[in-house]
Amino acid sequence: MVQGINYFERLIIMPEPYKYRAAFGCWINDMRNSAIPCEDWPSIVIDDKTEEDYLKCVGLARRAGFNSMNIFGFFANYSWSCDVPATIPDERKIKIIRLIEKTRELGLKVYCGLGVYSWGFDEIIAKNPGVRGTNPHAMCYSSPESFEWMKKVLDYVLAYDFDGIHLESSDLGRCSCEKCSEYGDAEYYSIINALCADYLRSEKKDIELMVNMSGYMRFGTHVDSEEDFQALVSLSGHIDYLIDGGHYGFFVRGEYRRRAFKEFSCAFGSSGKHWVYMPQRWDKLRWFLPTVAYTCGFLREDYRLGARAVEYYMGAVINPGVEMNIYCGGALLLNPERGTNDIMREAVEVLYEPKNSVSRERIENIFNEAEEAYYGNVNQETLRTDWVNELHLEPLFGSGPGKPVYLSDSFVTRYDEETKKYIEVELMSREGRARYKAALLAITSKLSGLENETGRPEKIGRIKICVDNALKDVESFAKK
């Protein structure tokens, strides 16, 4: 019986899953099941709701087959205090330790997301001229003083006994002073990541280390020289795995990507090609966007090329699409050769407890049709491997709930390889929205009475709310 297949049995079926199956928060409140409507991103509040919903996501991730939780926001977002330990009040310290312990009790390792020379250093940079370069958010690598500050942060984080560290040096840019400008982006970021990795290993030999390449190169560019590629080869000798998430297209493409799987000393992988980034200020039942077919298809293909690491985005598990994406993603990582339909079948059995095979197939079809309803009606150029993989539903920043930009006909910028120029492409046209609306209405009719055919009727109710809210957002464009 499909429902009886558990994590351990699937490990026996698939002797060589993805080795590093990281559930990526990414920020601690991205997994929150309620909105934080009036706070700018990223919120790092840790209250009872944060903890409750985080642990629900951990439980689902473990059940699906992930083996670590990688989380930003335990400590700081933009600013560590110059007195680093004083950044964290005693009450918050207790909460952090409790979250680490409970995550381990549920069976997952805990990685701390940590900025390298940036993401957390605004105050230190502002108050210490010796680390200041050309970027108010990133310390200058060429100043020895910068690494001394970096070590203070690393020492403090190590005291919490995390199983691993997610290193991220590039998301907020770099210093471009005269000395730092001698290094290209790939070399620069690889050097400071390796520097921190070596220090961490010198202090804790068994710690697991990974690097996420978010922002590693300028928008629209990618590894196109042997020099850039060898910088990554060198970095790979200092860490356990490297993630080229593909937020704006993969940095390591084509022949370089094929070589990476053979020449890197560490595991290499992605974030699964397509993912929905959680809208912090939105109600969590405002959208319905499964990504199972697209994501599982890509992860299977990447595994065949040699990928053995994934940092897979988590989210608010109260949303039916998010819950399904997490479960199916974890199942695929355990057995990358398993068929997507088979994975979906298991997920529906486990999550919805259908009363018979007909009911199960109806629920499966709802998810499959919802995925195609959206991705089949956006500009297909935006689904290319070298294009944006991260889908934002609302603007990332703001002081209140943002408009549904994922439905917008706004033009988004892409770098064209042939002309070497930036061009603008449409995300979803008026005609695309009309087709999406028709598909959602068809799904609505198919949901009728379905709650009576499962052991989890409340989840069918949530799908109905999500579809209804998505329709309202589509219709809001017609009123403009």
Image (spheres, helix red, strand yellow):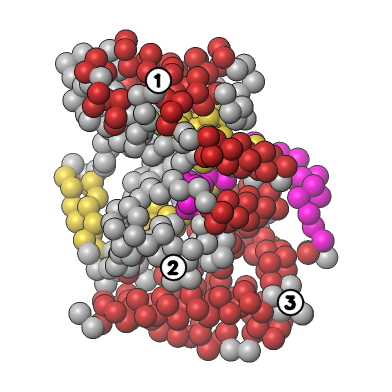
Residue at horizontal 58%, vertical 89%? 448
- Assign a secondary structure to mark 1: helix
Q: Earlier in the sequence, mark 2 or mark 3?
A: 2
Which of the numbered marks, if any, corresponds to residue 38? none
Which of the numbered marks, if any, corresponds to residue 283? 2
Question: Where residue 355 appears, x then y in whole percent?
Answer: 76, 79
Judging depth in this view, the residue of 375 and 420 nearest the camera is 375
Give the number of the mark in front: 2 or 3: 2
Give the number of the mark in front: 3 or 1: 1
Q: Earlier in the sequence, mark 1 or mark 2?
A: 1
Image: 267 above or below 413: above
Q: CA distance from mark 3 to mark 1?
A: 52 Å
Q: Earlier in the sequence, mark 3 or mark 1?
A: 1
Q: CA distance from mark 2 to mark 3?
A: 25 Å
Judging depth in this view, the residue of 25 and 343 nearest the camera is 25
- 180 sits to left or right of 307: left
**Position of the N terminus by quadrant:** bottom right
| Amino acid type of the residue that numbered disc 1 sits on in the rendered structure | Met
Judging depth in this view, the residue of 79 and 294 nearest the camera is 79
Residue on which the image places disc 3: 455
- Assign a secondary structure to mark 2: loop
